[in-house]
Amino acid sequence: MVKANKIMTYDEAIRRIEQIVHDLEQSEALSMDTYQAKANEAKELLNFCQKQLTNWEKKMEAIVTPEE
């Protein structure tokens, strides 16, 4: 599970998502609890990445948009 107080970078989050996907693809007999926990973690990580990308996009727009 993603720790709210742990500082994570975008790249770390992506690597963790990739690991979760790999784990799910390789595991044939996951318990529903394990599957649900991994799915919830992936969802949290995806939300984090989306926020990071949105923030990055806003920063880039501020850089490339000429001031009037």
Image (cartoon, rainbow, N blue to C red):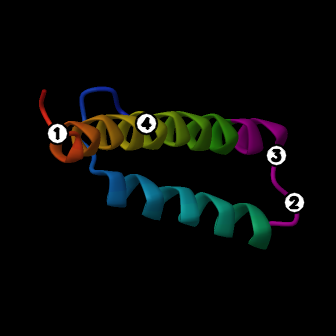
* Crowd around label 2: few <14 · some 14–19 · many ≥20 (10 Å): few
Q: Is residue 18 visible?
A: yes
The residue that mark 2 highlights is 29
What's under tag 3, amino acid-wise? Ser
Q: CA distance from mark 4 to mark 1?
A: 29 Å
Q: CA distance from mark 2 to mark 3?
A: 7 Å
Mark 2 vs 1, N-terminal side: 2
Q: Start and end of the magenta stretch? A: 27-36
Residue 12 vertical position relative to residue 3 in the rendered view, above or below: below
**Residue 48, numbered label:** 4
Residue found 44% across the figure and 64% down from its top: 15
Q: Secondary structure at mark 1?
A: loop
The residue that mark 1 highlights is 66
In this rendering, which labeled residue sits more in front, label 4 or label 3? 4
What's under tag 2, amino acid-wise? Ala
**Is 35 in front, or is 21?**
21
The residue that mark 3 highlights is 31
Q: Secondary structure at mark 2?
A: loop
Mark 4 vs 1, N-terminal side: 4
Mark 4 vs 2, N-terminal side: 2
Horizontal and vertical percent position of residue 43: 61, 37
Residue found 71% across the figure and 43% down from its top: 34
Total number of numbered labels?
4
Q: CA distance from mark 4 to mark 3?
A: 26 Å
Quarter residue 41 falls in = top right
| Direction from residue 19 to residue 13 in the image, left or right | left
What's under tag 1, amino acid-wise? Pro
